[in-house]
Image (cartoon, coloured by chain):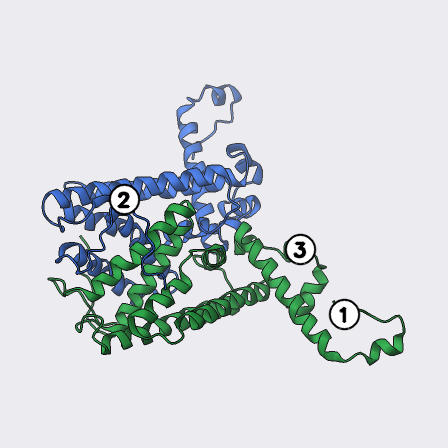
Chain colours: A blue, B green
Amino acid sequence: MIRRSADPARRFAEPPMPKIVDRDVQREEVLLATWRRIARHGAAGVTIRGIAEEAGVSTGFITHYFRDKDEVLAAALQLCNERVSERVAARGQGLAGMAALRALIDAVLPLDEERFLTWQIWLSFWGRSGVGEPLRREQRRGRESWRGALHRVLGEAHRAGEIRPDLDPSYEAERLIVLVGGIGLQSQMQRPRSFRRRAWSYVEAHLDGLMGPAPRSGAALPADSDTTVTGGSP
Amino acid sequence: MIRRSADPARRFAEPPMPKIVDRDVQREEVLLATWRRIARHGAAGVTIRGIAEEAGVSTGFITHYFRDKDEVLAAALQLCNERVSERVAARGQGLAGMAALRALIDAVLPLDEERFLTWQIWLSFWGRSGVGEPLRREQRRGRESWRGALHRVLGEAHRAGEIRPDLDPSYEAERLIVLVGGIGLQSQMQRPRSFRRRAWSYVEAHLDGLMGPAPRSGAALPADSDTTVTGGSP
């Protein structure tokens, strides 16, 4: 809070810095309020008016920072993805290969309230064809950053002989994205306690497959393979 | 369409049957219009007015059949789940064990427009804490029916020696729900063609793990085990 002097001259003499910081904080307050609205109503159910109510500001305050609802939503998603990236970087620090992989996955699994909220936000943006381009772009950016991180540590694990030599790190990164996404999805439909008990067991069962002996039919398919995958469809 | 006679007496003499059928058709039209709105705007962004516009009926027509928006959404989700159940039953007919398992999974994977729309609808309902009880109930019912079907065919595969004897069919059904959910989620974020090429490869890589030799750390955990799963968290 900036204390304002009653003297107009002194007031204008105030250094601008604290005010800018204050604005950044206020902008973040709006985005965190947007998170809470998304969790309750879904991204599509969010309104500028609802966010203003939640953040305790006027709708004019929000439209001062953001052009429209899509821009608020994209900024809220961006903040959410930034927080995840920071968590991923912090947990992975000093680790490599499989240890880093486990740390990365743990940073994203919905095992506490904040990470659960992250999944509520992500899921509310997916599955809608009507979202605007700023949102699409931020979705792609978030996914690519996550894929890149998984690919990097899987490559390390591969070179260190921690995972099967017949596996392709790029394809396995995709498989892990599918797995972690599936876990995030299930976290929304089960009781938190029993779910948390299982989330890591799903990951370990998957990682065991990467470390164990090659399966008999050799299904490992390179991500950039030109082979058309048609098998299995009855 | 029922042709109405200009003579009021004849009009009342019409047998009621065709009219009831007509109403069922109209009700389904409303629900299919609701699907399309959900795909575009998300479940939370759907309005009675929007559905009416999409279906080409009055809002009064909709409120005649449904108490409120939540009831329309629950009915739309129920219709969606019924269609999936019918597809699952039709494809699995005459099959058992692994062959039935593949057929079941194929019935749900987002490999064509209708199944892709199914995932758009499902995803738009998940991740929201503010949905009403009719919707929650229908979500649970759909999930239990899917889990039951997977459990049954995995049990058959287990008894027939088609999957590893150390696996627990109930736990493996949960793992498959996670996998298929993750694939459904990814289908929303990638280009349809390249995605379709990969969807079955993810499934086959997973099924190979069920059929192949037991992994070295023995991560298979029975679903009803009382063991607290904490492993892996760094």
Q: Nearer the viewer, residue B37 or A78?
A: B37
Q: Nearer the viewer, residue A7 or A79?
A: A79
Are both tags, 1 and 3, on one chain?
Answer: yes
Give the residue pinned by disc 3: B49
Q: CA distance from mark 2 to mark 3?
A: 48 Å
Badge 1 density bin: few <14, some 14–19, many ≥20, Cα 10 Å: few
Q: Is residue B163 visible?
A: yes
Q: CA distance from mark 1 to mark 3?
A: 26 Å
Give the residue pinned by disc 2: A225
Q: Quadrant of the C terminus of chain A?
A: bottom left
Front position among marks 2 and 3: 2
The kind of residue tagged 3 is Arg
Are both tags, 1 and 2, on one chain?
Answer: no
User: Where residue B111 appears, x then y in whole percent?
Assistant: 42, 55
Q: Is residue B49 left or right of residue B151?
A: right
Give the residue pinned by disc 1: B2
Q: Is residue A45 visible?
A: no
Res. A217 image quadrant? bottom left
